[in-house]
Amino acid sequence: MIDANVLPRVLHRASLRPLTLVEHEEAFASRERVTSLFDELEASGLTGRGGAAFPTARKVQLLREHHGRHKCVVVNAMEGEPASHKEVSLLSSNPHLVIDGAEYLAAMIGAERIDVCVARDNPAAINHLNQAIHERERERERSAKREAKIQLHTPPKRYVAGEESALVHWLNDKESLPQYRSTRPSVLRIGRAPVLVDNAETCANVGLIGRYGARWFRGLGTVHSPGSTLVSVTGALAHPTVLEVALGTPLRMILSAARADSDSQALLLGGYGGSWLDAANLDVAYDNESLNLLGAGVGAGVIVVLPLRGCGILETQRVVRWMANESARQCGPCAFGLPALAIDLAQLTRGSADAPDAYQRLIARCDAIVGRGACHHPDGVVRLVRSALRVFGPDIDQHVNHLPCPGSTSPTHFVPVPSLEREEELQWQ
């Protein structure tokens, strides 16, 4: 049994290859007997690690109360955040722990099947999961266990494809389109089957709770944010890395462990739909209750370090431009609002004659876009833009006065942004 107060947990025994089922059972052997899975999950206080931080037990209870037949658990391992590599690390080391959690969730809601979804351009993770699933099938045949059937799916990799309603839509119709939901949480369906969707890291933590219980799980973290979490750290550091940290760890300690640039001006927290945080706040705890007070959050578990020589407005413009290309374009805020934000940011970055007007338009467009999308994709972009306008005020003053800051002309970028696939469809100025 692994010690409650020792890290790593979900990355326990991580190596250059994934653990086999036999090695997994040895590494995560439990001396405890969890009598009620749901009671332990509820007492653990586990929240989703995919970005929304929704209480996992509440999501499970919603499905337990639903009396539809042929329920399904969907493991979301799409990892659409370009700056995130945590699920690749998890699936490359402990895929069986993820499957443990999915099987526990299936048992709690009475699901007959488990659909595991990995982006098709991630062959390593696909191979690791295929091997793990086949091992489980062989073990099931030997023991004659009656458990939920596990199937691997490989949707196309796009940012919105990992949004849970878009993922379920793909499992239904092979289209990655977010579905409008007037209330949340709400029950999604594959065909007529009610669906519980959780990301891979959340499932791995459910696997730990199922083996060791809620008290063990709460041995790390804070009262309101218990447990550990995976963090992808990139930007101004020699090598991007994935760390497992206790929630509540000061940001400064996380950056030190990642060997990040100590002279940073800001951090991008939570991913492309997250927020910039001024480096003056590096002593804040890495948990939602602390970060929310500063307008930020843990989000998708991403930290991008921006050094003093970088330009936050340019980095924001690059992200927004990419996010506009990645949208499903099925509603106005994404089809028209996000490209307009990117154009205004480009004009502001260049310090063009229209920069003062572009700044005012950014403020007005953010107000017009937020809360009007079919999903939260445009809201995340607005959150990012508003945080940039707040954190990089001195740089903005220079840009508005037609004096772009030195970082805006630098060939070095610090936020990892993939190449655009559909840029020709947008009218960039």
Image (spheres, rainbow, N blue to C red):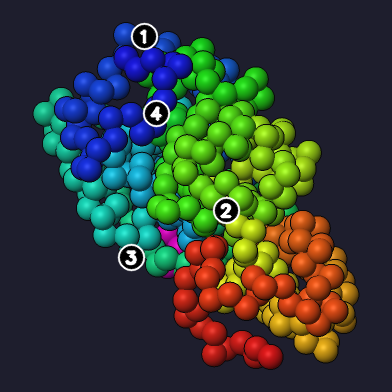
Mark 4 secondary-structure assignment: loop
Mark 3 secondary-structure assignment: loop
**Which label is found at residue 121?**
3
**What amino acid type should be assigned to the residue bearing mark 2?**
Val
**Mark 2 or 4, nearer chain start:** 4
Q: Residues within 10 Å of mark 1 (few under 14, many from 20)?
A: few
Q: Is residue 1 left or right of residue 210?
A: left
Q: Is residue 20 left or right of residue 14?
A: left
**How far apart, in angstroms, are the residues tagged by discs 2 and 4?**
23 Å
Q: Is residue 17 left or right of residue 62?
A: left
**Mark 2 or 3, nearer chain start:** 3
Q: Where is residue 225 shown, x and y percent of the image?
A: 62, 27
**Mark 3 or 4, nearer chain start:** 4
Which residue lies at the image location 22% right of the left edge and 43% below the top edge? 16
**What amino acid type should be assigned to the residue bearing mark 1?**
Glu
Q: Which residues are magenta?
A: 170-174
Against 424, is 3 above or below? above
**Mark 2 sits on what residue?**
305
Q: Are marks 3 and 1 in contact (CB under 8 Å)?
A: no
**What amino acid type should be assigned to the residue bearing mark 3?**
Asp
Quadrant in the picture for residue 113: top left
**Mark 3 or 1, nearer chain start:** 1
**How far apart, in angstroms, are the residues tagged by discs 3 and 1?**
39 Å
Q: Residues within 10 Å of mark 4 (few under 14, many from 20)?
A: some
Mark 2 secondary-structure assignment: strand
Against 82, is 99 above or below? above
Which residue lies at the image location 54% right of the left edge and 68% below the top edge? 413
Q: Where is residue 107 shown, x and y percent of the image?
A: 40, 28
Q: Residues within 10 Å of mark 3 (few under 14, many from 20)?
A: few
**How far apart, in angstroms, are the residues tagged by discs 3 and 4?**
28 Å
**How far apart, in angstroms, are the residues tagged by discs 2 and 1?**
41 Å
**Mark 1 sits on what residue?**
32
